[in-house]
Structures are given as structure tokens and as C-alpha cells.
Image (tube, rainbow, N blue to C red):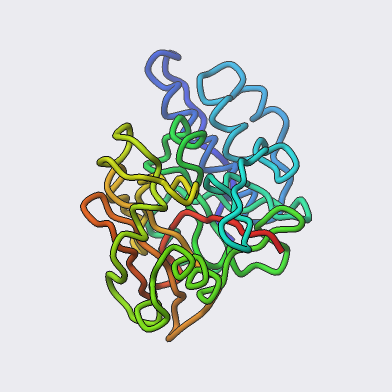
Amino acid sequence: MKDLKISIGIQPEFVWVEQRCADLFDAMERYNSAGYTIPVKWIRELRKHWAWEVYRSEFKQDTCAKNVYRTVKIGNQIWMAENLKVTQYRNGDLIHYVRDNDRWHATKEGAFCAYSHDMDLVSTYGLLYNWYAVNDGRGLTPEGWHVPSDEEWKILEMYLGMSQEEANKTGWRGTNEGSKMKEEGISHWKSFTNESGFSALPGGYRDHNGNFYHMGGYALFWSATEFSGGAWSRYLGYDYSEVYRYYHGKQNGFSVRCIKD
């Protein structure tokens, strides 16, 4: 097993504190992955530095019970009107927060992150999850909710005007269904109607190699449906009024919208 000890800084604090916090984060992530309890003394040290609030957000804060989400009824479906923010599974187990790009690419376990690891974005855009977290039997979503299947996404799209034939296609489909799903106004998109109340925001994504793309340009959402070694997903684009449907590798980090059971 890889050594779980952290490096000890001996330089003046103004020189080594940033590296010290990075070392603590790395060690806590490895302890968390190995199933060990994180030492209290590390938490106490982080309290002295700016990183404490980030630590709380990434490892402790956003449980299913503590989040309150806006919801909207669209046809016969009830959707959350904002992206998921949980950092624990429904049973209380922590979801792994993965910073390192190589580990993000290699893991076959549930993982999440904030876009560019900027926790200030989470309250608006939610968190990004790989598909292993979506599919974890411990439950990613709050009680009474689930990640929508590919068919449930189609039901939404057809209610907004897409034909069955179009809904079954891949790529950009429909006419203005995507426009009806995006937040109204120009704060985050071009001018769209949000006629459905779905209120999608362009939160970007993390690719299978760990790189971040398209904050402010695209909203990408997982479905719960596997296909061809990956899983179906949906895109909404800054310059598009349609909805994009395709399947992607499970290592990608996309936003999650929940639908009521």
C-alpha cells in the first residue's frame, strides 16, 4: 500500500502553508479511499488556514438531508430544477472527491468534484459526478428521487415538442426543446425562454482524463441508462436550441438532475 504519511513542513509558515494544505488534502483523500478515519489533528490544522471551509465542503458538508432543491412539474414528471450537490451516498458513506487527473481517469468507483475544484461555483452549478457514482447501489440521490433513465429524458423532450422519431436519434435533435429547458435571460446563456421551468445552467464538464471544459457554454447531464460500454447523456449548448443525445464513457464528470420516483 502507498505510504499514507504526509510531508512535514519546516519552512516559515508564509512559505509552506499552501503546500502543507495541499499535502493534508492529498493525505485525507488517501485515508478516505482506504477507509481510514481522518486524524482530528489534521482537521485542527486545517482550521487554522483558508482550506478548512473547502475541506468541509468537499468531505463533510453537503449530505442529502442538508440540501434543499427547487422542483418543477413538467407534464407528468417532477424534476429537480437545479443540479445535484451531494457528497455522500444515501446511506451516509462518503463519495470520493478526486482531484488528481490520473486517479480520475483510472477509478472505477464513484467520484465527484467541483468544476476546476472551485467550490464557489457549487451553489449555482452543483457538482460533477462520474457515472460510477450515478450507478452506485448506495444511492446517489435523496430518498424518493432517482437519476432519470434515457427513456425518462425522452418523455421530457417529447412533452416539450420533440417527436418520438427525433427523440430516438443521436446528436442534436428537435427544434427549440433545449431553449425551453434553459434558464431564462442572459445571466448565464443567450436569451432563452425556460418555458418548462427546468432551469438548466451551463456548468461544463470534466472529461475522462480529468480536464475541465465549457463552463458557461454547455450543460451536460447523465442518464441512468448504460449503452455500449458507456451511458446515455444529454447536452444543452450555448448556441443551440436543440437537445443533444449521445453515450459517453463512465469516467466523465457530468451534472446530475433528479426525477421523482
Q: Is residue 137 left or right of 222 when viewed as pictured?
A: right
Residue 86 placement (x, y as % from top left): 62, 46
Residue 26 placement (x, y as % from top left): 51, 43
Residue 259 placement (x, y as % from top left): 62, 59
At 75% from the left and 58% from the top, the residue drawn is: 144
Q: Is residue 177 left or right of 66 when viewed as pictured?
A: left
Q: Residue 140 falls in which quadrant of the image?
A: bottom right
Quarter placement of the C terminus:
bottom right
Towards the viewer: 70 or 232: 70
Q: Is residue 193 left or right of 69 when viewed as pictured?
A: left
Q: Which residue is situated farthest in the left direction here? A: 239
Q: Where 229 falls versus 42 (above or below)?
A: below
At 64% from the left and 30% from the top, the residue drawn is: 42
Q: Residue 252 falls in which quadrant of the image?
A: bottom left
At 36% from the left and 71% from the top, the residue drawn is: 245
Residue 102 placement (x, y as % from top left): 39, 59
At 59% from the left and 48% from the top, the residue drawn is: 72
Quarter placement of the N terminus:
bottom right
Q: Where 140 falls versus 45 (above or below)?
A: below
